Amino acid sequence: MNIQQLKIFIAIVEHRKLSLAAEKLQLTQPTLTFHLKALQQTLGTSLFEEHLPHRWILNKAGKILYPYAKQMIQLQTNAVQEITHLNEFQRTLLKIGASETTATYILPSYLATFQKHHEDYKISLTVQKAPTILEKIKKYELQIAIIAHGPIEDDELYVLPLAEDPLVIAVEPNHPLAAIKQLKVEDLLPYPFLLHEQQSTSYRLAKEWMDSHSIPLNITMEIGSIQALKEAAEAGIGAAILPKLSLEKELIQNRLVALPLPQYTNKRFIYSVQHKEHLFENTIYNTFIQFIHQKLAN
């Protein structure tokens, strides 16, 4: 039993004439007869009164099958409609992965502007730590990531640097370090310092900087949230090592001052990342990457 057979059965029942059913379905009468016989063979019984061969009157078996056949055809129609809708939605669904810095301090305003110019696109934003986001890209769970990270070397990934996001020292305006025009490593040593949590890119790059220059900073606190880290620095608890792009609002409002790390070579960038097998596969992602690249370049 298949959908085509059920459609033919229903058409014969509802039109009461083979010729009308064939015209409705745009099939030949022999084709209808062939499929009807196949259906009856599958069920092991006839579906119409055999003593009235040309009037197409349902027998008991036919009366049982008819409502179920109607229901099955309707279910098939519903399924096709929902899958078509899903496909249309997925063609306009932008599935983005982001790390905390990009999701909180970079993407919101850009996503708002992007949607104003591309109203048909829907956006799904997954926010997790950068290594987790990269794994999701490699497992095809996401198709593009905008993350803050150190150098990325992976043969499976296409990595495009969009902008620099160097680490800086953030202090409240009255902190003694804020008055020093050209910081040296020894200037930092008397003061307590705050770092992002150990699993973060910021912590790893700050630790590399300290280790490469044998800098014995007094790390008094590690904090899991960049926002909490900024508030701790603003409260005078210590000098915080933070990504510069995360400080834009506080710098504008003069709540914090950003100071360069002495002897620091930046390795932190904002990247767009795609799986190489998905590269340029969908024009929606091309449009988004070009938009973000242009915005960050400006």
Image (cartoon, rainbow, N blue to C red):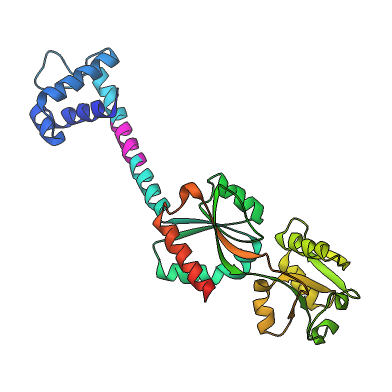
Residue 13 is left or right of residue 155, and the answer is left
Percent across and percent down for residue 98 are 59, 59
| Residue at image coords 43%, 54% | 280
Instruction: Let me know if residue 251 appears in the view.
Output: yes
Percent across and percent down for residue 115 are 45, 67
Q: Quadrant of residue 167 in the image?
A: bottom right
| Residue at image coords 74%, 70% | 264
Q: Nearer the viewer, residue 253 or 259?
A: 259
Q: Quadrant of the N terminus?
A: top left
Q: Nearer the viewer, residue 86 or 134?
A: 134
Q: Is residue 261 above or below residue 102?
A: below
Q: Nearer the viewer, residue 117 or 171?
A: 171
Q: Magenta-highlighted stretch: main secondary structure? A: helix
> Magenta stretch containing residue 110, yes or no?
no
* Number of numbered discs visible in the structure rendering: 0
- Range covered by the magenta-colored residues: 70-79
Q: Is residue 177 above or below residue 163?
A: below
Residue 221 is left or right of residue 107, and the answer is right
Instruction: Let me know if residue 56 appears in the view.
Output: no
> Magenta stretch containing residue 76, yes or no?
yes
Residue 123 is left or right of residue 220, and the answer is left
Percent across and percent down for residue 17 are 10, 28
Furthest-right residue in view? Answer: 190
| Residue at image coords 34%, 41% | 80
Q: Quadrant of residue 172 in the image?
A: bottom right
Percent across and percent down for residue 156 are 55, 47
